[in-house]
Image (spheres, rainbow, N blue to C red):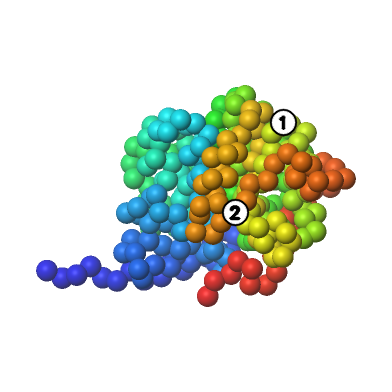
C-alpha cells in the first residue's frame, strides 16, 4: 500500500498579507500558520490539546481554571487564526458554545479549506470585525472572552480603548473572565494603558508573562486577565510556573505599581500596540 504523500506548504494572499501553512516534520498532521512571517497559530489536527505556543498555553490554563473541570462554557473568541483554542476547548469541555470572530475572510477560507473543523463541536465562525461583533453581542452572554487579534504583529487601535474594555464588560456574565494576548516591552506604555482601561470596568486584574518580559529585558507576550469576580490566581500561578517556559502571575499591588499614573485611553486617542523589534516574533 502506498504511503500518504508528504504534506507541502500552502501559500496564499489573504486580506492582511501573505499567509503560509507550514507542515511540522515531526507531527504528521500539524501545521504552523504565519502571516507576513509572523507566527499566528499552530494546530495539530490529531491532538487538539497539543499547544505549541507558550502564550496559547497560558490562555488555555485560563480556560481550564475559570470553571469546574469539564463544565461547558460559552466563549466569544475575538480573532480566529487557525482556531487553535476553539479546537482545544471543544476537546476539553465538550458541549461548549463558541463563537469565533475573524475579520480576515481570506485567512478564514484558507484555514477552513486546509484545516477543517470537526463537525458538531459547537463552534460557529463569523467573518466580521472584532469590535463590531463585540458591540452586537447580547449582554451577559459569555463566560469568557478570549481576545487574540493582531493586524500583522500589532493589536488594532479600535481594540485598545476604554470603550472597548467597557463593551467587553457588558458582554460578560457577572463571574465572567476576559483574557487577551498582548505584546509590549519596557517602559510598557501600551500595557499600562490597557490595564488602566480595564480597571475602569473590572475589579480584578492580572497579568501573565515571563519574568524577562515583566522585568523589561525583552519585548514579548503578556496575557491580560480581567473579571468582576476573583480570578483563580493560585491555580494559574501553579500552572504557569510549571510550564516549559515558566511565567509569573502579577496582580494587586504589583499591577497598581505598573499602572502608576497611566490613564484610560479613549477611542479618539487610541493607537495600535507597538511595532515589535525586528525578529521578535518572525520565523524563517
Q: Is residue 171 above or below residue 84?
A: above
Q: Is residue 228 above or below residue 215?
A: above
| Circle number at residue 203 | 1
Q: Is residue 225 visible?
A: yes
Q: Position of residue 271 (x, y in %)?
A: 78, 52
Residue at position x 42%, y 30% in the image: 71
Which quadrant: the N terminus? bottom left
Q: Depth check: give the residue in front, 134 or 202.
A: 202
Which residue, as the protein is rendered here, is positioned at the far right? Answer: 261
Would residue 22 be found to the left or right of residue 163 on screen?
A: left
| Circle number at residue 247 | 2
Q: Are marks 2 and 1 in contact (CB under 8 Å)?
A: no
Residue at position x 57%, y 35% in the image: 232
Q: Position of residue 157 (x, y in %)?
A: 74, 50
Label 1 residue SS: loop
Tell me the CA gap for discs 2 and 1: 23 Å
Amino acid at each position: 500500500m502506498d504511503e500518504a504523500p508528504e504534506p507541502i506548504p500552502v501559500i496564499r494572499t489573504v486580506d492582511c498579507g501573505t499567509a503560509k501553512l507550514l507542515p511540522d516534520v515531526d507531527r504528521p498532521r500539524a501545521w504552523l500558520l504565519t502571516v507576513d512571517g509572523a507566527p499566528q497559530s499552530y494546530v495539530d489536527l490529531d491532538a487538539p490539546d497539543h499547544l505549541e505556543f507558550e502564550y496559547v498555553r497560558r490562555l488555555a490554563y485560563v480556560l481550564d481554571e475559570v470553571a469546574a473541570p469539564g463544565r461547558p462554557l460559552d466563549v466569544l473568541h475575538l480573532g480566529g487564526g487557525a482556531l487553535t483554542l476553539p479546537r482545544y476547548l471543544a476537546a476539553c469541555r465538550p458541549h461548549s458554545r463558541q463563537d469565533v470572530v475573524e475579520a480576515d475572510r481570506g485567512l478564514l477560507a484558507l484555514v477552513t479549506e486546509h484545516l477543517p473543523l470537526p463537525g458538531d463541536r459547537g463552534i460557529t465562525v463569523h467573518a466580521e470585525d472584532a469590535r463590531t461583533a463585540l458591540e452586537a453581542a447580547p449582554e451577559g452572554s459569555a463566560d469568557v472572552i478570549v481576545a487574540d487579534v493582531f493586524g500583522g504583529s500589532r493589536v488594532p487601535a479600535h481594540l485598545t480603548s476604554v470603550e472597548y474594555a467597557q463593551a467587553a464588560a457588558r458582554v460578560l456574565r457577572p463571574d465572567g473572565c476576559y483574557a487577551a494576548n498582548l505584546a509590549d516591552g519596557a517602559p510598557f506604555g501600551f500595557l499600562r494603558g490597557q490595564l488602566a482601561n480595564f480597571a475602569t470596568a473590572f475589579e480584578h486584574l492580572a497579568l501573565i508573562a515571563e519574568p524577562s518580559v515583566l522585568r523589561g529585558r525583552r519585548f514579548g507576550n503578556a496575557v491580560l486577565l480581567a473579571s468582576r469576580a476573583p480570578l483563580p490566581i493560585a491555580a494559574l500561578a501553579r500552572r504557569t510556573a510549571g510550564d516549559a517556559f515558566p511565567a509569573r502571575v502579577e496582580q494587586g499591588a504589583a499591577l497598581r505599581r505598573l499602572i502608576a499614573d497611566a490613564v484610560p485611553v479613549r477611542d479618539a486617542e487610541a493607537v495600535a500596540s507597538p511595532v515589535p523589534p525586528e525578529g521578535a516574533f518572525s520565523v524563517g
